[in-house]
Each structure stands twice: as C-alpha cells, then as structure tokens.
C-alpha cells in the first residue's frame, strides 16, 4: 500500500481544485470546463469536482498505490515539472488548502474519481519510482 500524503473533505469553491507549485491566478484563463474537465500545464493542474452548492468532495493524495475507495475511474494523468517540489492543492477561494512535498523535477501522476463529470471522491496518485 502507498503512503497517504494528505486528505480532506470539503466544499470546493467554484467546483474545481488546483494542484500547483506556485499559486498564480490566471494560469488557466483559457480553460473551459464545459469542453474538458481538467487542464494540465507544466507545473499546475485545475480540474472539476463536485460544486460546493451540490455537496462535499473527498480528496486523498497518495505516493504509491492508493487504498481501495469509490474513486476507481481514470479521470486524467500528467506530469508536473517541479522546480522546488512544494505542491499546493486548493480550491480557487482558498477555503481548503493542503501543502505537500515531492522531489524537484518531473513527477508523473494520475487521478482516479467516482465520476468523470463532477466527482465526489478523488484520489491523486504519484506512483513510486
């Protein structure tokens, strides 16, 4: 089993979460969630989750194989190229913020959810290398 790096259950403002090395607003200005439910750049990701007006979302971040959960559907995958290795997971309103650390350099990851539209359960997985 992998290492649980962090977890939370919260109402996600605007129905999306950001995973980024440096919280910079405007990086995802061209993202249209009606066309695609996520946007991955070199050092940041934004993706749709259950809107706060509809309920809570549970998010778990793993290094290695995640424990069994409702999040079984592949949502998307990518690689974050990190200069320092400090990652922040947050909603756009900073209602929920979680910080964790990875190695600087390329960090592949994949995301599992319980729904490909507006997930209530999300596992973000950084495979062990």
Image: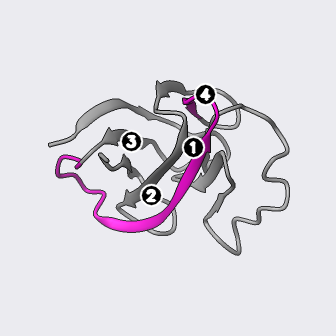
Q: Is residue 44 left or right of residue 89?
A: right
Q: Are marks 3 and 1 in contact (CB under 8 Å)?
A: no
Q: Nearer the viewer, mark 4 or mark 1?
A: 4
Q: Is residue 75 left or right of residue 48?
A: left
Read off the magenta span.
65-89
- SS for dot 3: strand
Is residue 18 visible in the rendered image? The answer is no
- SS for dot 2: loop
Which class describes the residues within 10 Å of circle 4: few (<14), some (14-19), or many (20+)?
A: few
Find disc 2 in the rendering and name its residue.
119
Mark 4 and mark 2: Cα distance apart in space: 30 Å
Decide whether residue 78 is among the magenta residues. yes
Mark 4 and mark 3: Cα distance apart in space: 27 Å
Mark 2 and mark 3: Cα distance apart in space: 9 Å
Mark seen at residue 58? 3
Find disc 4 in the rendering and name its residue.
84
Find disc 1 in the rendering and name its residue.
52
Return the residue nearer the eye: 125 or 30: 125
Tell me: residue 42, above or below residue 76. Answer: above
Mark 1 and mark 2: Cα distance apart in space: 11 Å
Q: Quick one: label 1 or label 2, which is nearer the N terminus? A: 1
């Amino acid at each position: 089993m992998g290492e649980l790096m962090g977890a939370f259950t919260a109402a996600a403002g605007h129905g999306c979460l950001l995973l980024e090395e440096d919280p910079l607003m405007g990086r995802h200005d061209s993202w249209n969630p009606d066309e695609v439910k996520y946007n991955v750049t070199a050092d940041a990701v934004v993706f749709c989750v259950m809107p706060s007006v509809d309920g809570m979302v549970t998010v778990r971040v793993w290094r290695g194989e995640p424990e069994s959960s409702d999040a079984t559907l592949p949502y998307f995958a990518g690689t974050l190229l990190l200069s320092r290795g400090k990652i922040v997971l947050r909603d756009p309103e900073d209602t929920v913020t979680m910080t964790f650390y990875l190695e600087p350099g390329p960090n592949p990851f994949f995301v599992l959810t319980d729904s490909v539209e507006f997930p209530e359960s999300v596992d973000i997985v950084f495979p062990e290398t």
